[in-house]
Image (cartoon, rainbow, N blue to C red):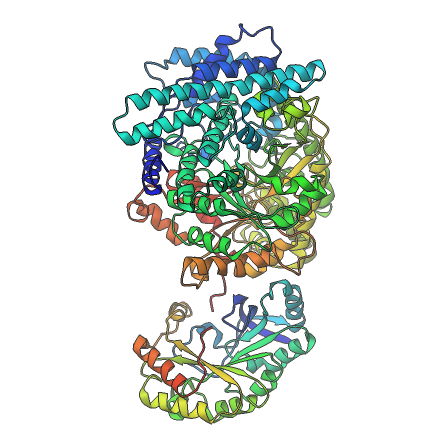
């Protein structure tokens, strides 16, 4: 390539990442807020959606821009993010975390200095508090605070968290999309929304032109020929893209970066979990056009990967990028760019963007061989794994058209959405089954604070236990109704902040409606998510109650008193409860209960409708919230003590499955995956010694044979197979050593671990989350036998 | 009928073909000082009914991939032959394997019912075998000769310094293997101390102090066996 060979480009990417990680201050989002405030009056007469389009153009015109001397492409995400994400914030404490429900809390995440004075920050905060969006959202939270304070459920407005489809914009150019808009005719609302989309698309052309001018300026002042060449190359590309179609891989990536940048600026601050989608399919046509080598392709892609890392802790989190998979006819879609992406990821080993791999029963050996080095290199990022065969079935059953199936990909951690077509509001609501069981047992009083929450129930302890299922599911129904009403309230509040740019790449040009519109559906697919917490804890509690009533009826009355006292003075009873059958050991009774809890709760959630009348999507994942919400749940009949974590996703509670990987897999295979339309999460922590192969490639194939095939592609599976898992192939002992001596075990300062759907620098995490990762390795649930 | 088991779980390819549900049965007729499962020497563990085990095996079938199935090992699994045979008889569709020291009178009755038979042949020296492990070599050798009449078997040699790694032992190993009729292969299992910690845990003294064999010795054993047309494999 004229800008240098792949080794040189790789060195530049590494310098660029180093430079990014040295950045401690993020203030672009604040300037964006100010630009919006300053232009409020100017656009006061416009409908909100058109105002949003115009303001995006102003942002593109005014935002300070720069290009690093190490850059190969122009563009950054920095201005869209604040230093907010709790789990990588050292100040984070489980005890004080209260969710992201205050949209003005972000003003605490900017450091005051001479430029950003306290007065300036407070002025902006005060202004924001009076905006219709913040007022409406606050009123929703106020209305439901009785339930959200101790997290019987939680709700939030969902920004980010979708997968745009930039392919038409990259291929034909943004001008072509604008021309498409011009051709459309609709009703007044559609015309207005499309005008907004047009303005928003013009913003990216404005930004590209500014970067082009800056690149030329930098070329003139370049310190050396190499830098000059790269700056001229950027300028040359920006003459064409993103306004016009890309003809080379370089142009395609440059176009993609600026489109992404504007999409994020539109939702600043903190549009977490925007995701790339099927990256290898996006870029392969351009690589193939040039017949670019795997090394050169990987070198360019390394710069794309660096783009996803924002500042010192990679504050833009959960940006998913997916590789591999099959088409609707079962043909494997792995290509040369897939392997170049693997190479780029492995060599860079950065916290973002998170890598996922789609697998199916005919995935070639080479994919597993390529993954071996990730799984078996300590401190290296690892892909999370999706089962296309199962996922296609789940999505088809839930109304996704056959020709859209291959375009499903993952938004954020594990939520399956159709790329460019699906507004899933994935994290809209959060359901805490543990708390609901607690309130059912106590008749509506919190074990944690003693507060009355929800309906009271004065029946006797024995009566409660004898009818526990009926009472629990009735309560679950009541809370689900409240929760989804609240969640819809959040979505309606958010619709006050339209997103015309995103809408243009999410099917909005065709429909003529904004992706956030709550009356007319802007995206071809729409739903709202509900993350369900505590399935196995509740199932194991039901089983323990049954056992107690059968074996020790004389103790039944004591159970509720025991859990009120967090088992203090009832240690023997707790030991008994802990010895009752638990999910995750291929025990029929416990497993059937887990299936029933999962199934019934999924049905309750899916019966609720969102603001457009589409079902809520049950998502059995708990992205660290098993820990945060567990903190608000008292002791339960399964023997779990007060404030301890809930089970993670669909997994058994740590320590409860103690018979090894085979039995745990058998239990997990029984769950009703067809009902998990919003996704699910499962984690396996496996001792590296379980794998005997001599090379990483051999171990990659061995991993398929020993772990993945039985779980994902088991010919004896009844019903739909599990479709998602992620792994950490390590042991608690290894991680403790890393924490004790990071200089020895992670000399670069980066030791990547998987934590729910995302991966993170283990050393960046708050201590509570580090301990959570260690605890959940849960080696007894995944080990082979000791003998 | 009841069966005593001290450990169970899945293992891939090391205890018979494919992925296998491995039951470690309690109680052993030998007392090998290098044993990696000393907790299985006494007849303790947990008692299960054979019906429970049959149900567990049936429900575990999805895990028997790559030609897998169930392996009984120990301790010495043939000491509980009646229970094992009852389980096998009830599950004709399952692939069964035993890992045995072949030093019991009940060995044949169980081995004949299995698809795969793995036996230890620890030493070709009768005296040494008797003294160190308590086993009678004639029982072991007769069992091996008899089972070879109907089955292919896999024979393992735990290679232990100052017990069976000398040239004299090697020569006698070869003599014995050459005297066999039937289909078999050999695997050398070099001494390890994975079980050492368990001895301490159960309050027993681990008495082997110099069991490790050199790479050269392992290579010599493998090459000499092969040179004598004896099939050597590694699982």
Q: Is residue A350 visible?
A: yes
Q: Check the image and report above or below for A726 versus B29.
A: above
Give A694 or B107, whichever is nearer the viewer: A694
Let me know if residue A581 appears in the view.
Answer: no
Q: Position of residue A238 (x, y in %)?
A: 44, 25
Q: Position of residue B83 (x, y in %)?
A: 63, 78
- Observer-nearest residue: A139 or A348? A348
The image position of residue B129, as x and y in percent, is 40, 88
Position of the N terminus of chain B by quadrant: bottom right
Q: In this view, does A5 lie above or below A219?
A: below
* Residue farthest left in this picture: A223
Q: In this view, does A525 lie to the left or right of A90?
A: right
Q: Where is residue A333 in the image (x, y as percent from the top left)?
A: 57, 47
Quarter-wise, where is residue B224 in the image? bottom left
Q: Who's the residue at 69% across and 29% down the image? A: A610
| Residue at 66%, 30% in the rendered image | A483
In front: B223, or A98?
Answer: B223
Which quadrant would residue B229 be assigned to in this image?
A: bottom left
Q: Which of the two residues, A236 or A162, is positioned nearer the viewer here? A: A236
Left or right of A537? Residue B230 is left
In the displayed structure, A487 sits above or below A56; it is: below
Note whether A438 is above or below B46 in the view shown: above
Going by the image, does A18 lie left or right of B64? left
x 33%, y 81%: residue: B220
How many marks overall?
Answer: 0
């Amino acid at each position: 390539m004229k800008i240098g060979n792949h080794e040189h480009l790789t060195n530049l990417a590494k310098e660029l990442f180093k430079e990014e990680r040295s950045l401690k201050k993020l203030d672009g989002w604040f300037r964006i807020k100010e630009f919006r405030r300053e232009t409020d009056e100017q656009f006061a007469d416009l409908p909100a959606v058109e105002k949003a389009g115009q303001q995006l153009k102003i942002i593109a015109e005014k935002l300070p821009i720069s290009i690093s001397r190490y850059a190969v492409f122009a563009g950054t995400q920095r201005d869209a993010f604040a230093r907010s994400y709790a789990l990588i914030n050292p100040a984070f404490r489980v005890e004080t975390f209260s969710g992201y429900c205050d949209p003005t809390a972000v003003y605490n995440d900017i450091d005051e200095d001479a430029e950003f004075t306290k007065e300036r920050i407070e002025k902006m905060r005060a202004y924001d508090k009076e905006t219709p969006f913040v007022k409406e959202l606050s009123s929703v939270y106020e209305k439901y605070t009785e339930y959200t304070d101790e997290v019987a459920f939680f709700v939030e407005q969902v920004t980010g968290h979708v997968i745009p489809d930039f392919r038409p914009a990259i291929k034909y150019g943004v001008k072509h999309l604008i021309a498409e808009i011009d051709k459309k005719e609709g009703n007044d609302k559609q015309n207005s929304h499309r005008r907004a989309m047009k303005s928003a698309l013009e913003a990216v052309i404005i930004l590209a032109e500014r970067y082009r001018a800056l690149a030329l300026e930098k070329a003139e002042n370049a310190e050396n020929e190499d830098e000059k060449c790269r700056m001229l190359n950027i300028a040359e590309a920006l003459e064409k893209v993103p306004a016009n179609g890309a003809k080379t891989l370089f142009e395609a990536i440059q176009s993609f970066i600026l489109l992404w940048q504007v999409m994020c600026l539109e939702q600043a601050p903190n549009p977490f979990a925007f995701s790339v989608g099927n990256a290898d399919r996006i870029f392969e046509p351009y690589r193939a056009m040039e017949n670019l080598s795997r090394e050169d392709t990987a070198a360019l892609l390394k710069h794309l990967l660096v783009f996803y890392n924002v500042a010192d802790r990679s504050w833009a989190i959960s940006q998913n990028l997916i590789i591999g998979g099959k088409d609707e006819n079962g043909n494997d879609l792995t290509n040369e760019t897939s392997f170049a992406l693997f190479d780029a990821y492995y060599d860079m080993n950065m916290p973002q963007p998170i890598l996922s791999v789609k697998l199916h029963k005919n995935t070639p050996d080479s994919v597993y061989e390529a993954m071996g080095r990730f799984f078996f290199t300590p401190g290296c990022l690892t892909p999370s794994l999706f089962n296309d065969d199962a996922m296609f079935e789940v999505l088809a059953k839930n109304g996704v058209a056959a020709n859209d199936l291959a375009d499903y990909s993952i938004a954020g951690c594990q939520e399956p959405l159709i790329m460019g077509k699906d507004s899933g509001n994935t994290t809209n609501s959060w359901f805490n089954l543990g708390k609901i069981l607690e309130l059912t047992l106590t008749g509506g009083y919190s074990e944690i604070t003693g507060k009355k929450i929800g309906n009271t129930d004065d029946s006797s302890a024995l009566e409660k236990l004898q009818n526990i299922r009926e009472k629990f599911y009735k309560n679950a129904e009541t809370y689900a109704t409240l929760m989804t009403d609240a969640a819809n309230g959040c979505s309606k509040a958010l619709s006050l902040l339209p997103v015309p740019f995103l809408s243009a790449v999410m099917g909005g040009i065709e429909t003529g409606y904004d992706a956030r519109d709550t009356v007319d559906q802007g995206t071809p697919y729409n739903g709202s998510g509900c993350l369900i917490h505590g399935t196995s804890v509740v199932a194991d509690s039901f089983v323990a109650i049954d056992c107690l009533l059968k074996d020790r009826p004389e103790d039944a009355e004591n159970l509720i008193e025991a859990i009120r006292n967090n088992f203090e003075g009832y240690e023997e009873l707790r030991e008994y409860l802990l010895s009752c059958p638990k999910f995750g050991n291929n025990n029929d009774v416990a497993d059937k209960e887990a299936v029933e809890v999962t199934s019934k709760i999924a049905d309750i959630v899916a019966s609720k409708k969102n603001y457009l009348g589409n079902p809520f999507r049950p998502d059995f994942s708990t992205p660290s919230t098993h820990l945060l919400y567990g903190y608000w749940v008292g002791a339960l009949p399964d023997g779990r003590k007060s404030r301890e974590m809930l089970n993670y996703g669909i997994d058994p509670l740590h320590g409860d499955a103690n018979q090894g990987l085979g039995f745990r897999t058998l239990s997990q295979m029984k769950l009703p995956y067809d009902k998990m339309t919003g996704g699910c999460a499962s984690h396996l922590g496996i001792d590296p010694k379980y794998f005997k192969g001599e090379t990483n490639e051999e171990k990659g194939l061995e991993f398929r044979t020993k772990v993945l095939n039985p779980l994902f592609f088991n010919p004896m599976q009844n019903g739909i197979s599990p479709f998602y898992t992620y792994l950490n192939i390590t042991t608690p002992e290894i991680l403790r050593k890393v924490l004790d001596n990071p200089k020895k075990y992670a000399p670069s300062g980066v030791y990547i671990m998987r934590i729910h759907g995302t991966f993170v620098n283990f050393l960046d995490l708050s201590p509570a989350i580090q301990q959570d990762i260690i605890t959940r390795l849960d080696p007894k649930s995944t080990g082979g036998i000791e003998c | 009928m009841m069966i005593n088991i001290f450990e169970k779980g899945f293992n891939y390819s090391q205890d018979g073909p494919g992925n296998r549900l491995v039951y470690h049965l309690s109680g052993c007729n030998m007392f090998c000082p290098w044993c990696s499962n000393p907790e299985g020497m006494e007849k303790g563990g947990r008692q299960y009914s054979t019906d429970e085990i049959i149900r567990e095996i049936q429900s575990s079938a999805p895990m028997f991939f790559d030609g897998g199935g169930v392996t009984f090992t120990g301790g010495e699994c043939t000491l509980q032959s009646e229970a094992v045979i009852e389980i096998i008889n009830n599950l004709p569709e399952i692939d069964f394997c035993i890992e045995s020291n072949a030093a019991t009178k009940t060995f044949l009755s169980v081995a004949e019912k299995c698809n795969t038979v793995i036996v230890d042949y620890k030493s070709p020296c009768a005296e040494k075998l008797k003294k160190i492990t308590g086993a009678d070599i004639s029982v072991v050798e007769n069992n091996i000769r008899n089972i070879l009449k109907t089955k292919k078997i896999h024979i393992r040699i735990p290679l232990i310094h100052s017990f069976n790694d000398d040239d004299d032992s090697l020569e006698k190993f070869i003599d014995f293997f050459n005297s066999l009729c039937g289909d078999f292969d050999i695997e050398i299992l070099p001494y390890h101390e994975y079980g050492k910690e368990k001895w301490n845990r159960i309050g027993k003294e681990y008495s082997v102090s110099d069991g490790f064999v050199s790479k050269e010795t392992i290579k010599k054993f493998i090459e000499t066996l092969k040179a004598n047309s004896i099939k050597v494999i590694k699982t």
